[in-house]
Amino acid sequence: MENYDIVRSDFNEIAELGDDPKWNHNNCYFPYLLQHVPAGVGTCLDIGCGKGELSALLSKNAKKVIAVDLADKMIEYARSNNAADNIEYICGNILDMNYATSSFDIIISTATAHHLPYDWLLEFAKDKLRPGGKLILLDLAKANSIADHFVWGFAALPNVIMNLIKNGSLHKDDPHTTAVWRKHGEHDSYMTIHEIRSFVAQHLPGAIVHRKLFWRYSLIWQKK
């Protein structure tokens, strides 16, 4: 069972680190995620919005973005740095929030799904999305198969190259930032791609799960 007091404390500390690197293992996939968001879409729910970078990008296409995060300092940062008239930032645990059936056109989340009960998240999307709406996830996964080890082992080289090109350094983070993230990582646990696909087959048949290069996977599902 996730200890959300620890998660909140970790991400409040992460919020105080300031701006994210120009390139990291999450924001490098934002263009890919946004390809699945139709222009002029209605209401988007961003679960675990963090500092609001993706929420701000969504707001350029969506009529409304509801952006939720557990950490109050993350929400403070997002409101100060990534505000828009059509974004509503909410501090709280998504598990405690009540939304009507068919409330959203898009439910999107990056690097947050592993903090939630996975079956709950998939059923939440099934219930809260409008017909034609999409669930769009990017999250971390645990290496287990030969393909995992091959793809994610190879990722070490492009990781260094992209850090040099985008961030001007061999590493995306300074030593203090690395230590803060490492401390948070000690509380994290991830599923394998096989486990993720098993959950998806049970709860969201037809969802597409792809292994991504930088130790992540994407899940795209459209409600019929």
Image (cartoon, grey):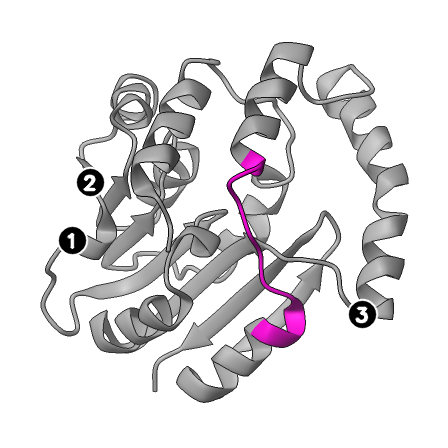
Disc number for residue 206: none
> Is disc 2 in contact with disc 1, using a CB cutoff of under 8 Å?
yes
188 left or right, relative to 150: left
- For label 2, the residue is 92
| Amino acid at dot 2 | Gly
Q: Residue at x 55, y 21 (%)?
A: 180
Helix, strand or loop at label 2? It is loop
Residue 91 vertical position relative to residue 168 in the rendered view, above or below: below
Range covered by the magenta-colored residues: 185-195
Residue 53 belongs to the span the image colors magenta: no
- For label 1, the residue is 96
- For label 3, the residue is 145
How far apart marks 3 and 1 lie (CA) works out to 35 Å
Helix, strand or loop at label 3? It is loop
Residue 23 vertical position relative to residue 44 in the rendered view, above or below: above
| Amino acid at dot 3 | Ser
128 left or right, relative to 171: left
